[in-house]
Image: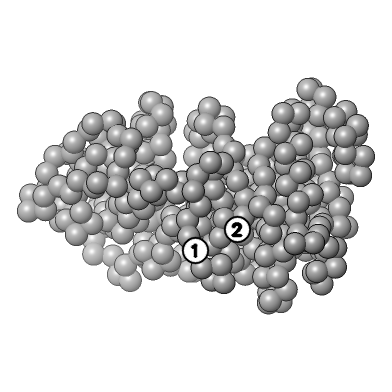
């Protein structure tokens, strides 16, 4: 397919924050050059690199706008790029990720389709993984609760209106680690957010870097949920905020236990004990266990990417219309605090809830999930005693 600058009625600026990116920036830029619709400009913000990233860019990519700045972190770097951009639409790309050739074409077409669209997201995959089969014509709207829940909307998959980004206040440096979710949560309150469930970019995640940032991101995510509590209350049932808190804590406790992070595990256990048991049980049955099943199926089929498989349903995030009970003082049962229990321990086998049995999921691989009670099990007490 021929490359063109006129296939779209709207133009786009590509913003790439780069810190010590000599080893990856060339691949990232090559994927931009391979787009079937070319951007108006490419802006690389050299965020205080010490490995010669800026020199490499000026030597090998003279047509790329390089903006040097002292080390400020990804939020500051992306904000700098947005400030420098001259197009009404911004496509973010991390310096270690790459795009599929039709990414901008597909996203710009969707951006033109409705005047209230503020962000178009695209599915991702890890290099070497087999992308899932999806209907490329299907568009999935994302609401506020889904975005705030922590559903992964990586910057490299985002095409966003520059006006919408600025109206929402841009990236907040004090939220590094969840700076993307923080901004998208504010943006979706003002403009619509949609997802194209097709793999259009590759996420080259560094697992050691992710583990190092996980606890900080977890605490920043809790702070974001507290800040958004009023907005959540207007869009959910009586326990909506508590369900969002439970969902985040349960997922992070799974990661902490898998990574051997005892501090994170202990913090999650403490926080779960402060949430009404009704909310924790609802989250466990309607959100967390389905998440684990989808995760196991994704890993078992080799489709370790995200094109909507892990998107939590809004109805489950809103919670029950009327809570069945609250514990005195707003606290859950003490044994409820060990809700994740043996879940992430390789070979761990939870106890059996009376009358429910234990379901062993053949899709769970790698020792991450060996057994768990079905979502229809009675919820009295800890599913993992």
User: On the rendered structure, is 205 left or right of 346?
Assistant: right
Residue on which the image places disc 2: 122
Residue 51 is tagged as none
Left or right? Give the position of 170 relative to 224.
Answer: right
Please state the horizontal and vertical placement of residue 180, each as a whole percent of the image: 62, 49
The residue that appears at 77% across and 43% down in the rendered structure is 29
* Residue furthest bottom in the image: 114
In the rendered view, tell whether residue 210 sits above or below residue 78: above
Residue drawn at x 42%, y 40% as measured from the top left? 252
What separation in Å lies between label 1 and label 2 (alpha carbons)? Answer: 12 Å
Extreme front residue here?
1
Q: Nearer the viewer, residue 7 or 65?
A: 7
Q: Secondary structure at mark 1?
A: loop
Q: From the viewer's perspective, is the residue at label 1 or at label 2 nearer?
A: 1
When asked about the image quadrant of residue 8, the answer is bottom right
Q: Is residue 123 left or right of residue 357?
A: right
Q: Earlier in the sequence, mark 1 or mark 2?
A: 2
Q: Residue furthest left?
A: 355
Query: Does residue 267 show up?
Result: no
What x and y, as percent, mark residue 160?
71, 60
Q: Secondary structure at mark 2?
A: strand
**Which residue in the protein does label 1 denote?**
134
Quarter where residue 243 is shown: bottom left
């Amino acid at each position: 397919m021929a490359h063109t600058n006129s296939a779209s009625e709207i133009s786009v600026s590509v913003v790439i924050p780069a810190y010590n990116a000599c080893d990856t920036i060339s691949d990232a830029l090559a994927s931009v050059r391979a787009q079937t619709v070319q951007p108006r400009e490419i802006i690389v913000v050299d965020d205080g690199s010490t490995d010669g990233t800026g020199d490499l860019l000026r030597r090998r990519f003279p047509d790329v706008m390089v903006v040097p700045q002292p080390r400020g972190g990804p939020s500051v770097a992306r904000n700098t790029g947005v400030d420098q951009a001259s197009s009404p639409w911004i496509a973010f790309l991390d310096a270690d990720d790459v795009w599929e050739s039709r990414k901008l074409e597909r996203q710009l077409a969707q951006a033109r389709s409705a005047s209230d669209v503020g962000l178009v997201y695209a599915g991702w995959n890890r290099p070497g993984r087999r992308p899932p089969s999806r209907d490329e014509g299907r568009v999935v709207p994302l609401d506020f609760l889904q975005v705030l829940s922590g559903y992964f909307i990586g910057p490299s998959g985002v095409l966003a209106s520059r006006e919408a980004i600025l109206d929402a206040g841009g990236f907040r440096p004090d939220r590094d680690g969840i700076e993307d979710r923080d901004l998208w949560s504010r943006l979706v309150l003002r403009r619509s957010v949609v997802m194209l469930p097709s793999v259009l970019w590759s996420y080259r995640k560094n697992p050691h870097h992710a583990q190092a940032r996980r606890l900080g991101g977890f605490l920043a995510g809790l702070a974001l949920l507290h800040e958004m509590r009023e907005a959540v209350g207007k869009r959910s049932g009586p326990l909506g905020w508590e369900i969002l808190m439970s969902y985040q804590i349960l997922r992070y406790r799974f990661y902490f236990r898998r990574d051997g992070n005892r501090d994170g595990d202990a913090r999650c256990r403490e926080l779960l004990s402060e949430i009404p048991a009704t909310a924790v049980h609802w989250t466990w049955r309607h959100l967390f266990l389905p998440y684990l099943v989808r995760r196991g199926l994704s890993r078992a089929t080799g489709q370790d990417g995200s094109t909507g498989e892990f998107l939590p349903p809004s109805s489950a995030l809103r919670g029950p219309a009327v809570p069945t009970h609250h514990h005195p003082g707003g606290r859950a049962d003490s044994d409820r605090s060990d809700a994740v229990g043996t879940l992430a321990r390789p070979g761990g086998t939870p106890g059996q809830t009376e009358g429910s049995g234990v379901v062993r999921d053949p899709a769970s691989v790698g020792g991450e999930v060996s057994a768990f009670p079905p979502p229809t099990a009675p919820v009295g007490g800890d599913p993992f005693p």
